[in-house]
Image: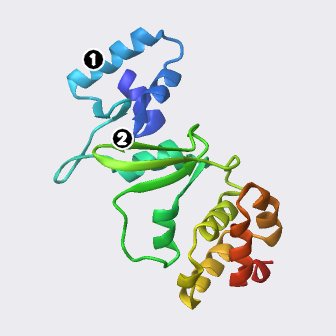
Amino acid sequence: MFIENLERRFGANNPIFVEDILAAESNKSRPTVYRMIQRAVEEGTLMRYDRGIYYIPKQMEFGLAVPSVDRVVEKKYIGDNGEVYGIYGKLVMEVNFALSTQVPNTIEVITNKEKRDVREIEIRNRKVILRKSRLPITSENAAAYTLLELFNGMNMKEYNDRVRRRVLEYAKEKNVTRQSLMGMAAAFPARAVKNMAMSGVLYEVV
């Protein structure tokens, strides 16, 4: 029943954090739950992914599927089940907004889940840079936060028509307004709004 309950709640081949398991089995003591985890791992019905991270194996055509590090980071630090608590940082932003074509091996995120200003961790030998959010990130403000963070770190010499088009497409797609940007601006360095004003984007969103 233990694995069946976890699979019903989290699905197969999805990262499951130990705190998720403890919450799902809140009617049991922590030592009991840890013993259940250990037994399931020994039986092979639950796989250990990394420290404090597990998944239920799923048989695919070419063997057992394994969650990607990106998926683990997304669920832990970006958002899950409609809840948003983080955004991708500079390294991913540069690719998403046409400032770079090189897909980074390092994952950088800005998240409510981090208490330090910046911290580096490794998940399966892949480096992850965690940055504490300047203010709480939610599904309502994540897109505006992303644009402010983008312009805060942008070298305006690299700003061109291709980047401008991508930024405006993103703002339209995510319904980012001038009011939402200015409402968050005080939490960012002045250069974020200055660069956005220089780009003209601040005056092109509704």
Which of these two is toward me, 102 or 170? 102
Which part of the image, by quadrant, shows the C terminus?
bottom right
Q: Residue furthest left?
A: 62
Amino acid type of the residue tagged 2 in the rendering: Ala
Q: Give the vertical position of 56 relative to 3 (above or below).
A: below
Colour option used: rainbow
In which image quadrant can residue 51 be found? top left
Q: Position of residue 39 (x, y in %)?
A: 27, 17
Location of mark 1 (residue): 39
**Within 10 Å of the Cα at label 1, are there few (<14), some (14-19), or many (20+) other Cα atoms?**
few
Residue for point 79% across, 64% down: 180
Which part of the image, by quadrant, shows the N terminus?
top left
**87 displayed left or right of 126:** right
Count up the numbered dots: 2
Q: Secondary structure at mark 1?
A: helix
**Within 10 Å of the Cα at label 2, are there few (<14), some (14-19), or many (20+) other Cα atoms?**
many
Q: Position of residue 108 (x, y in %)?
A: 46, 55
Q: Position of residue 123 (x, y in %)?
A: 34, 43
Which of these two is toward me, 4 or 86? 86
Q: Position of residue 34 (x, y in %)?
A: 37, 16
Give the mark, 2 or 1, whose residue is nearer the N terminus.
Answer: 2
Q: Residue furthest bottom?
A: 161
**In this rendering, the label closer to the viewer, 2 or 1:** 1
Tag of residue 190: none
Residue for point 59% across, 80% down: 156
Location of mark 2 (residue): 12
Amino acid type of the residue tagged 1 in the rendering: Arg
Residue for point 53% across, 17% down: 26
| Residue 175 in view | no
| Residue 5 in view | yes
Q: How far apart are labels 2 and 1 at the CA level?
A: 18 Å
Residue for point 82% across, 60% down: 183
